[in-house]
Amino acid sequence: MALALYRKYRPATFAEVVGQEHVTTPLVNAIDGGRINHAYLFSGPRGCGKTSSARILARSLNCEQGPTSTPCGVCGSCVALAPDGPGSLDVIEIDAASHGGVDDARDLRERAFFAPVNSRYKVYIVDEAHMVTTQGFNALLKVVEEPPEFLVFVFATTEPDKVLPTIRSRTHHYPFRLVPPTTLRGLLEKTCAAEGVTVEPTVFPLVVRAGGGSVRDSLSILDQLLAGAGPEGVTYKSAVGLLGVTDDALLDETIDALAAHDAPGVFRAVDRVVEAGHDPRRFATDLLDRLRDLIVLDAVPDAGGNGLLDSPSDRLDLMSQQAQALGSATLSRMADTVHEGLTEMRGTTAPRLLLELVCARMLLPGTDGSAVATLQRLERLERRMSIAGEHAGRPGAEAPVAAAAPVREAPVTPVREAPRAAPAAAPEPAAPAAPPAAAGPRKEYVRPSQRAAAPAARPEPAAPAAPAAPAADDWPETVKPGSGARTAKPAAAKPAPEPAAPPAEQPRRTPAVAQGEPDIPLPPEPTDDEDWPHPAEPAAVRAAQERAQQPPAPAVPRPAAESAPAPRGAEPTPVVTADPAHSANPDQPAGGGELGTSDVRRVWPELLKVVRGHKRTTEALLKSAQVQDLAGGTLTLAATSPALAKMLGDDLNKDVIRQALLELLGVRWKVQVVVEGAGAAPGAAVTPEVAREAARQAEAAEARELMAEREAEAARPEGERAPAVDPEQAALQLLKAQLGAQPIEG
């Protein structure tokens, strides 16, 4: 039969006792100084070395070279009192749990006055001393108060308050403590090395946490794992299954889903816990421990370096991102919610139901009237107000702020736009009414030149008037499906001479269409993986590009009202583009059905590293975003503000993300960026200034790398240098290859 590890590696000297230096050092000094007391009280949690220290004390007192704090280990007394020794007649161990009555105390008192047989001291070690009855303590009181010179009492207990005060006051009290995790892990690693068994490093935190700071409990758990280990040793998977703890991957998935306010993901995690046969109470306990670690990491960013958290560096990086995504108020409220749920789970017959209710309360802070939930909602409102104040007065600022507001928009009443100035004699054909947006998932595109500065009722034109000034925000508008709004009737464009080039002082405005130019079908609305339209080019240039890119055969069909050329100044009918969902898409996901949202969140740190290799600014912006959803081959990223969403939604940044996804996962997904919704859990307060500063630092680092590359290129010999490339020629080649442009001879 194999000897248990906690008995095999029981300490034999005070120097071998781990984690109790505050007790062993005074005892060593007292023994070496000859100040030996007649009674000691060792108190503390179970398995922390109380009884072992009592045996070491008896061994030190009866050593032939002593009393000494370092027993020789070769004399008869040291050999008998060794951890694997037979014991000594002069050292008596009594279990007070079964011998705590008054009769047992009287028997001890009668035998205590007999001198030791072959030792210097006669030592009584009373374990579980708090189990001795009051009558038993009263029977021992006289002998404990005035014992013979050769008699020493050592009381060991886990509850010193239950020891009779008259007994406790006559002893030297040494309180033992739980062993710190770092010290306990070192002991476990040393034990595994002595046993010659390979153990994965991720197993030790599980054993330390399961042991709860008790050396005996931790060694017992390690002994069980070593007994069931295979040829490969103790693996993390086998330890998780044997100890019944929740897998870190499942906890990470739950935390990421809570941070993204992904209710389906949270309840899927609960279902996985139950389907795997785990106890919902244990899952809630492990989730509370994880929230505690995130709270500590949020308050102390270097908690892993100073010993507050015992986790690998890669785990600390992931946990830091989780803490930033949730925020201190959210973490505190969720921890309180889980703690209250654990109290409610005691004795319940439906633990899964209570766990799901706890998850629902964590996802809905608005239903909680506590001060912490109110603080969370206030933080969310303050963040949105700061974003709204920063973008006030900027073009297009109202739309993003309104999109982030936690209120439902009212249906928009169809209103005609005020026309731009047109000749009075121009006929006005009736344009067919635009179909309602709810009739089908179609998207309509309105030209920038057909927008007015302020919508109003359409009056009848009386006389020619001066052309209206172009709007300050002349961006194209897109009517989203299901928004409840109808397309406004476009106004006629004012004929104007074709400009040779766009005005230098207004580079972002769209000039009017050239006079006499026939109406050209509008291009389809950008798909979801493209950003909002860029500032429009001059009408002549745009028309030439459209004519060059559109083949004559598969031309877009015109509505019936546009079959004939419209009179000058007439209103063109809005062109309704085809549903992009039914059109061919070359970027269909390759194997996307095998991956889910939780999988992307799990590999998010690796994806950031790949993005960093392509473009540092994109990586800096992605650090303030999080994965919200993956459905239909479209990866949705949630940004904390409209400004960050616009910066991250740039075509160049999304191309970098798609390329990184292709390199890392081998998939071709669409990428869209949205603003964190009203119901989403608030993340860290990442302001646009912080994002811009991070992007600026990334650009500076990228510039430094570019300068270093140029210096290295200049330092090469003449024959090894790369051929110089003319930037203008490279730009022309890019235009020819990507846009089909042809140089104009002349």
Image (cartoon, rainbow, N blue to C red):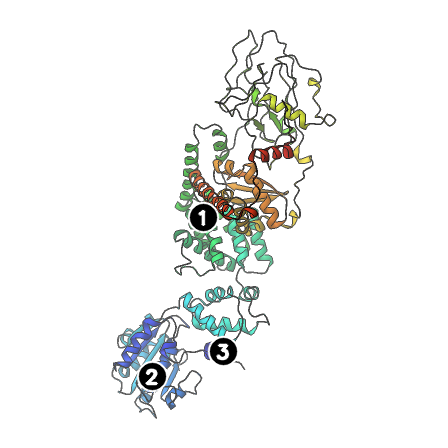
Label whose residue precedes the other's in the sequence (3 or 1): 3
| Residue in front for this viewpoint, 587 or 111 | 587
- The percent coordinates of residue 342 (x first, y second) are 47, 56
Amino acid found under the numbered disc labelled 3: Ala
**SS assignment at label 1:** helix
Q: Residue at label 2?
A: 60
Q: Is residue 262 above or below residue 742?
A: below
In the displayed structure image, the side of residue 471 where residue 133 appears, left or right? left
Q: Residue at label 3?
A: 4
- The crowd level at tag 2 (other Cα within 10 Å; few <14, some 14-19, many 20+) is many
Image quadrant where residue 548 sits? top right
| Residue in front for this viewpoint, 399 or 426 | 426
Q: Is residue 407 above or below residue 746?
A: below
Image quadrant where residue 244 sits? bottom right
The residue shown at (43%, 27%) is 393
Q: Is residue 146 above or below residue 382?
A: below
Amino acid found under the numbered disc labelled 1: Gln
- The crowd level at tag 1 (other Cα within 10 Å; few <14, some 14-19, many 20+) is many
The residue shown at (31%, 91%) is 115
Could you say which disc has been placed on residue 196 in the image? Answer: none
Label whose residue precedes the other's in the sequence (2 or 3): 3
Could you say which disc has been placed on residue 324 in the image? Answer: 1
